[in-house]
Image (cartoon, rainbow, N blue to C red):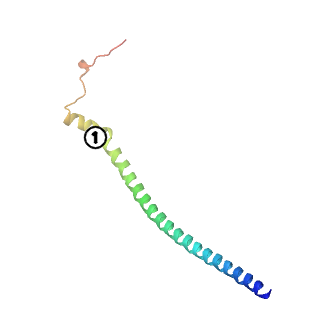
Amino acid sequence: MFVNQQAKTISGVAVLAVAVIATAITCVFARHESRKQFTRLQVLIVERDMLEVEWGRLQIEQSTWSTHSRVEQLARRKMKMRNPAPAEIRVVRQ
């Protein structure tokens, strides 16, 4: 009877030891994954900041390219456009 009780105790301790080891491995894995995800987050934050800077630069560039004076200058120079003389203006009515 005593041997049977001792065997149950040993098997119970073994089960608990396996559970503790499994829990420890799971904790280590979770911590490792957490660190990997944090590193990835930091990389993405840097990338986001760089993209925001580029976006701002592109917005400034777009506003520069589309200013009225620039469009008028290009129309005159490249397309040989000009303002019509008053005699050339025709009003169309329906």
| Residue sitting at the far bottom | 2
- Local crowd size for mark 1, using a 10 Å CA cut-off: few (<14), some (14–19), many (≥20): few
Q: How many marks?
A: 1
In which quarter of the view is residue 47 placed? bottom left
Q: Nearer the viewer, residue 15 or 7?
A: 7
User: On the image, numbered disc 1 is attached to which residue?
Assistant: 70
Q: Position of residue 86 (x, y in %)?
A: 26, 20
Q: Is residue 32 left or right of residue 47?
A: right
| Residue type of the residue flagged with mark 1 | Arg
Q: Quadrant of the C terminus?
A: top left
Seen in the picture, residue 46 relative to 19 is either above or below; the reply is above
In which quarter of the view is residue 29 placed? bottom right
In which quarter of the view is residue 17 placed? bottom right
| Residue sitting at the far top | 94
Seen in the picture, residue 93 relative to 45 is either above or below; the reply is above
Seen in the picture, residue 58 relative to 2 is either above or below; the reply is above
| Residue sitting at the far front | 1
Q: Position of residue 70 (x, y in %)?
A: 28, 40
Q: Quadrant of the N terminus?
A: bottom right
Q: Is residue 51 left or right of residue 85?
A: right
Q: Position of residue 59 (x, y in %)?
A: 38, 48
**Circle 1 sits in a helix, a strand or a loop, which is it?**
helix
